[in-house]
Amino acid sequence: MVFSSVIFIFFMLPLFILADNSIRCAGSVLGAHEYRYRNISLIIISLFFYIWGEAANVFILLGLGIVNYYAGKIIYNNGKRIIYFIVLNIFVLFCCKYVCWVISLILPFLELKQPKLPLGISFFTFHAISYLIDIRRGVIQPAKNAVDFLTYFCMFPHLVAGPIVRYAQVQHELTRRGPDASLFSYGVFRFLMGLNKKVLIANSVAGIADAAFVLSSQGHLHFLDAWLGIAAYTVQIYFDFSGYSDMAIGLAAMAGFHFEENFNRPYSSSSIREFWRRWHISLSSWLRDYLYIPLGGSRGSVLSTYRNQLVVFFICGLWHGADMTFIVWGLWHGIFLIVERMKAGALIAKLPSGLARAYVMLVVMLGWVFFRAENMAEAMTYMKTMFMPSCAPSVLSFYAMSMVVLMLGVVLCLIPDRFLPFSPVSEKKELSAGLYFCHAALAVISVSMLITSSRNPFIYFNF
């Protein structure tokens, strides 16, 4: 089940709001135990949400949740044992996601089919690891009871596609969140905004990107269509994933939780380093705090710093999927981060703003070719088409309505912040009635499109 589905909007969302608000209204009767009943309700709804799409794999989720709850207590008393539990989490992730791929690399004559991944396993594995490490570092204490921890671990807004939420960010709200009309209203707005980004923009331009890669695999892609297709995918993946993050943040706010922002208009960056401060912020900060800094960060020699960056982005690529395309995508970004640390970085910093942003967009778009392609051969064929004009006819321009949406998406990605009516990362969260009404009206169109359309996946549900 995805947030932008008719079933979720008309069944799951009302059930979630009704259950949480009913318990809140009964707070005078329940007294100090109100928060626990709200947490239990959230766990039940989250498990129901997960079972809807992953009936059998819910046992992996629950098993890891219970193991990591007790692991936290053990580590609190004996920090030296943390390595065993981190290895256990990584081992489960490896068995579910990478074992078939690794075997096929070692024994290429074996034709192994990768089984369907448990939804969100990459995300809730990182949740578990950050929880255990933060206990070991003394940042947090273990959850007081299993209900509190499972509420954090299984909470459906972030369960299957992030953002990666650390226990320290929500631990106080697990027991102290209360009725807050302004936060609930803000949550509804963010949900509507995310829904519109996903359905009206991401879904609309997806056809152009899909058609471009199909034509490329058939050898019939015009080089202009190749650029058009990757531009469409660049817009699609941003509005798809940032739209999901908006909906997750909104749903959490409706339940009384504050999730940190996951995107800050990354295509406005003037360097790849800045891009990674704005793109998938919860992942990039996780890799920084739990991998890059423990490896030594930039405290050692220049060569060790470069090595650490390549290791981090190798892991970043591998985290996204068991395929060389993801690894190359990660290393592609890692290499440009190293380039920006060299003398070339000083030259890039001196570029006019427009040229610097054009450089970032070129690097990012070329990287998305590897991310989107099914395999390395397809990626290289697509890349070759982008830079070698062919005799194939240009056909993607016939996607008239999608082209209009694509241009709108590009404008929304690149327009300066001062021209936007709302900035999620700003401290000022007041919403004008006109902006609220606008997104509510657009949401009606989004829902009508969902009812009449059969294609509505989330890209990051694959990870």
Image (cartoon, rainbow, N blue to C red):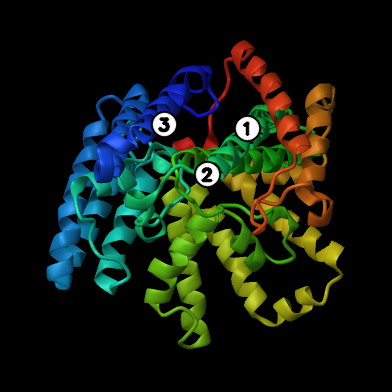
Q: Nearer the viewer, residue 113 or 427?
A: 427
Which element carries disc 1, helix, strand or loop?
Answer: helix
Which residue is located at x 82 percent, y 51 percent? 415
Q: Nearer the viewer, residue 412 or 330?
A: 412
Depicted 321 relative to depicted 437: above or below? below
The three-letter code of the residue at mark 2 reads Ile
Q: Is residue 280 left or right of residue 52?
A: right
- Residue at position x 48%, y 28% from top? 2
What's the distance in space between the residues labelled 1 and 2, CA to CA? 11 Å
Name which quarter of the figure residue 240 lies in. Answer: top right
Residue drawn 39% across the image and 54% down it: 170
* Label 1 CA crowd tier, 10 Å (few <14, some 14–19, many 20+): many
- At 36% from the left edge and 57% from the top edge, which residue is drawn? 172
Distance between mark 3 and mark 1 Cα atoms: 20 Å
Q: Which residue is mark 2?
A: 249
**Amino acid beneath label 3:** Asn
Q: Number of callouts in the render?
A: 3
Residue 257 x/y as whole percent: 45, 47
Q: Which residue is mark 3?
A: 21
Q: Looking at the image, tell me whether mark 1 or mark 2 is earlier in sequence order.
A: 1
Residue 333 screen position, x and y as percent: 59, 61
Packing grade of label 3 (10 A; few <14, some 14-19, many >=20) is some
| For marks 3 and 1 on the same chain, the one whose residue lies earlier in the sequence | 3
Which of the image's four quarters has the N terminus? top left
Q: Is residue 224 left or right of residue 441?
A: right
The answer to which of 288 and 231 lies nearer the viewer is 288
- Residue on which disc 1 sits: 192
Q: Nearer the viewer, mark 3 or mark 1?
A: 3
Of labels 3 and 2, earlier in sequence is 3
Report, in whole angstroms, how far the alpha carbon at label 3 lies from the one at label 2. 18 Å
